[in-house]
Structures are given as structure tokens and as C-alpha cells.
Image: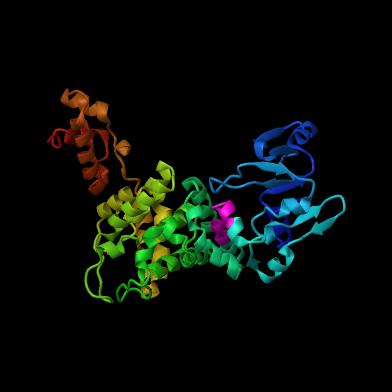
Amino acid sequence: MVGGVIRDLLLGRKPVDWDVATLARPEEVCGEFEKVIPTGIAHGTVTVLNRGMSVEVTTFRGEGAYSDGRHPDRVVFLESLEEDLKRRDFTINAIAYDIERKTLLDPFGGQRDLQRRVVRAVGNPMARFSEDGLRPLRAVRFASILGFSIEKKTFSAIRKCLPVFRKVAPERVREELLKMLAGPRPERGIEMLRSSGLLGEILPELLPGFGFAQNRFHRHDVYRHALACLRHSRGDPVFRLAVLLHDIGKVMTAAGPPGMRTFYNHEKVSAQEADDVLARLRFSNDERRRVRALIENHMIHYEPAWSDGAIRRLVRRIGRENLEDAFRMQEADVLGRGRLVRQGLSNLRRLKARIRRVLRQDAALKVTDLAINGSDVMRLLQIEPGPRVGRILTALLEHVTDSPKDNSRQRLEELVRLYDL
């Protein structure tokens, strides 16, 4: 057994991926098991499915040059495990366990680095990072998730190898970023990305906020506020990415002197900027819509004088399916301000209670909740399908948002002609 499984077992963590290195060639491994997937057979790797487990099995190998910054141009099968471990990224991932002899093989001091809580490249970090452009980001991800530091020479090599990093596919960058955001202290990882130069390659939109002062409601600059919000966020990685990006439009919308700045409509600009980020990193359309809705609606200044109709419009704008996320984003935003926190949390509790009370009234929040539909409108007005039908239904929805008791078939049929503008 090699790599991450040994690292995690030595740290007392539950392994996620199980990897085995072997002298056996891929075709020999395929002959030993009934269910084998040739995941990377050209590079000596197959995946064995056995007893409900998925195990990646790789023949001892050495590698040639990496012209594309991600994959070796050629692979040479080796007879030595130690030679195989030399090609691995970090010492903490270059530890092996000989199952038959029940002994650990650690030729590069991985156990020592685990004890010192440090991420160190195997051999020359420039060589390791030049082979695979994703490794610098993986170094930050491991350090962030494990709470480790990055060894000085390894860290210095990251900035020098940014041209190789730029060759990495956006999808691979996205997956590493999401894994880091799933960790216990993702804000540490973001700061390491900034200080190493990687943030300018992955999320350059965050950099203008560094040192950009806000106003009396905020203790931190725009960048540090984003990190503080991320530290207080609770949720899945995509949600946490929305939290991280929720204010990236502030610098562009700022007006007034430092300490007294205003940021009118920054939520709309931030939502558009965040959408561009997610498109660049190849997120799905559903993920982009979710993030955009959360950021566009994170500025809610609730007043008890709001009508129930105003509350329903707010819920409609956010989307009922996004409500809990919106609450958690508001909470992270308040905690991340560092000032007027108690007042902000109290106001948020009142808003949540009010929304839940209004939602119990079972009012219509979308056109399909109306007691009549498009076919009814066409029948009553003797018209064909078209935009006119949609306009009437939207007007009826606006009406019952303020007067939910009117959402009955009889009453809406009476109102159809009134709203046929």
C-alpha cells in the first residue's frame, strides 16, 4: 500500500483512496481479478473492484518528461519500489507499507514530516512541480486540510513554476479548490494561495480587495472580510465558494473615502463576477445559478415594518430551495464583519422567524402555485398561446403575493380580465 492511504492511517484519519504499488504488470493484475477497470493502463494503472472496494493498482514505474505539464510522455516499468516512490509528489505521500513483511518503507522521511506537520516535495521541488503543474495547488490543499505548513524550498518553488501550473485544465483546478474548501480551515488555504502567487492564477478577482478598507461596519479590508466569512461558513464547498466570492464587486462599486465608503449594488456586480469565475472553472449551470442567487441576495436589511407581501417577494427572489443557504450566508457575513455582530445576528433571527411564519400561510410563490393555469387564461379570454398569457399569470401572482386569500379558482377567474393589459 502506498501514498495517501498510509499518510491518513499514520495521522489517524480514515483513508478515502486505496492505492497499491506492485511489481506485477497491468496485464498480470487484470488476470488475477474478475473486475478490473483499465483506468490508466497506458501508464501502468488499473482499478480493481473487489469485495465492495475500489483499489487503484499501479506497476512500479519511472516517468519521462511532462510536455503538457500534467502527464508523462512515456512510462518505464521498474523493478524497485524505492525508485517508484521517487516520482511521487510529497514525502508524506511517498511512504509505503509492505503487507507481507508488515514493515513501513519511508526512504524520504515522510514520517518525520508528518510529525513536524510539514509538506515537502520529494527531492528537488522545482523538478516535481515542473513535471506536474497541479502539484503546487495540491501542496496548498494538503497543508490547508491537514493544518500543516509548506517547507520553505517547496513553497518558494510554487511561484517559479506558475507557467507550468497554467497548463492545467480548469476542471482539475476546480476539483482541487473544492477539496480545499471542504476542509476545516479553508481560509488558511486561500491565504497560502495568495502568498504563493497561485491565487492570481485561480481567483484573481479576490486580489483587488487586499488592503482595500471598507467602512465603520467592518473591522477588515475586503479581502480579509472574505476570509473571515469563509472561516465562519458552514456548508458544502460550492456554498463556501459563494461565501468567498460574495463581495468581489466591492472595489468596482466603492464610493467615498476609506473608512466611509459605500458599495451600492455591489451584490449585483459581485454575482456577475462570481458567475464569470465559475464559468471559467467549468462549474455546472445549476451550480452557477445557485451561487449567483446567493450572492445577488446576500444584502438583506430587514425591517419589521415589511409587509408579508414583501417577505414573499424576497423568498421568491432567493428561491425557497436556497433559503437555508441564504440564512447561512447572512450569518457568515455578519460574523465576518467583526463589528456590530450581536445586532446583526439578532436582526437575522427576526428575519428567519418572520419568513417561517409567512411561509406557513401556504401562499403562492410561483406561477405554478396559482389556482388557475395558462389553459384557463386562454379559455376565459379566447386567445392563443403567447407572451400575453405569461404576463397575465405574472400579474396574478403579484396580486396574490399581497392578497393570498384571493388564490382561488373563482376569484382568479374574476381577476383575469382586470390584468389583461
Name the dominant secondary structure of the magenta segment: helix
Residue at horizontal 23 percent and vertical 36 percent from the top: 393
Q: Is residue 149 above or below residue 60?
A: below
Q: Is residue 187 left or right of residue 405?
A: right
Q: Is residue 414 left or right of residue 271?
A: left
Q: Quadrant of residue 85?
A: bottom right
Please say which color scheme the image uses. Answer: rainbow
Pick whichever, 31 or 216, lies toward us: 31
Q: Is residue 9 above or below residue 228?
A: above
Residue range highlighted in magenta: 129-142
Q: Quadrant of residue 119?
A: bottom right
Question: Can you say which quadrant of the picture contains the C terminus?
Answer: top left
State whether residue 81 appears in this view. Answer: yes
Q: Is residue 318 left or right of residue 335?
A: left
Residue at horizontal 76 percent and vertical 45 percent from the top: 78
Residue 6, image x, y percentages: 73, 56
Residue 386, image x, y percentages: 21, 28
Q: Is 130 within the magenta?
A: yes
Residue 185, image x, y percentages: 54, 65
Q: Is residue 211 above or below residue 173?
A: below
Residue 223, image x, y percentages: 39, 67
Q: Is 29 within the magenta?
A: no
